[in-house]
Amino acid sequence: MASVPARRSRNLTQNVVAALSERIRHGEFHVGEKLPTESALMESFGVSRTVIREAISRLQAAGLVETRHGIGTFLLEPRNEQQLRIRTENILTMLDVLAILELRISLETEAAGLAALRRTDAQVQQLRGILDEFAEHVRKKTGNVVVSDVAFHLAVATATGNRYFHDILKQLGKAIIPRTRVDSAALAEDDRTAYLGRVHVEHEDIYNAIVRKDPDAARAAMRTHLTNSRERLRRAQEAAEQGA
């Protein structure tokens, strides 16, 4: 009978570790920042001091935090060996952006399909809000559409339920949107509002497929969206090479 409470304690510890790890990944705590006290964590999770201490010990073993006796527990810089390193400062040319788009077509096409299968109602509402914000920026010609654009792709990645999709895209940051590096509308000799309008329509197609829980349509819509971006840039690159 003694194994029953021990097993329950292990499960509680695992739950606390998972919850704290998720909060760290989503940026609730910043590197060097002090985590809540043991008492605050006990109250937050409704568990004993023993469970909290074991959870912190596991986070320490994973290299996520360190405890300074008498001061508290602090978030550490992630270990380099645990990170996939893609240096966004090296994404400088159209060829670099094209290479990133090839990666994204593979990655985000599958992400869209998984999002259609796994999304929650709350995630659908979040996507809707982001799209409405993007459309408002385009209509009023105000605000930063890139922020909304990045947010949409990250939200689709989050809806997969697989954190690695989100982690890779978040690491790339604004570099995942080609027009932050290359003015796609200008290269295509296109009106910026019309260009962004087409981007919005492509986003809507992805969204509608996710709402319908249609993974095949979601994959197709995402592939079309990213392939269109790639082809616009490819044509611009060819024109630049010919003019050189």
Image: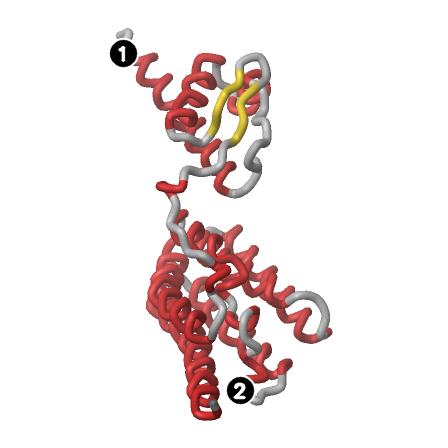
Report the front residue among 181 and 198. Answer: 181
Q: Considering the numbered disc 2 on the image, is that residue within a helix, a strand or a loop? A: loop
Assess whether mark 2 and mark 1 are in contact (beta carbons under 8 angstroms).
no
Q: Earlier in the sequence, mark 1 or mark 2?
A: 1
Q: Is residue 65 above or below residue 37?
A: below
| Residue indicated by mark 2 | 188
Q: Considering the numbered disc 1 on the image, is that residue within a helix, a strand or a loop? A: helix
Q: Nearer the viewer, mark 1 or mark 2?
A: 2
Q: Quadrant of residue 225?
A: bottom left
Q: Is residue 239 above or below residue 33?
A: below
Report the front residue among 84 and 1. Answer: 84
Mark 2: few, some, or many residues within 10 Å (few <14, many ≥20)? some
Name the residue type under label 1. Answer: Ser
* Residue at the bottom extreme of this rendering: 243
Name the residue type under label 2. Answer: Ala
130 relative position to 79: left or right: right
Q: Quadrant of the N terminus?
A: top left
| Residue indicated by mark 1 | 3
Residue at image location 40% in from the left, 51% down from the top:
85
Residue at image location 38% in from the left, 59% down from the top:
111
201 relative position to 81: left or right: right
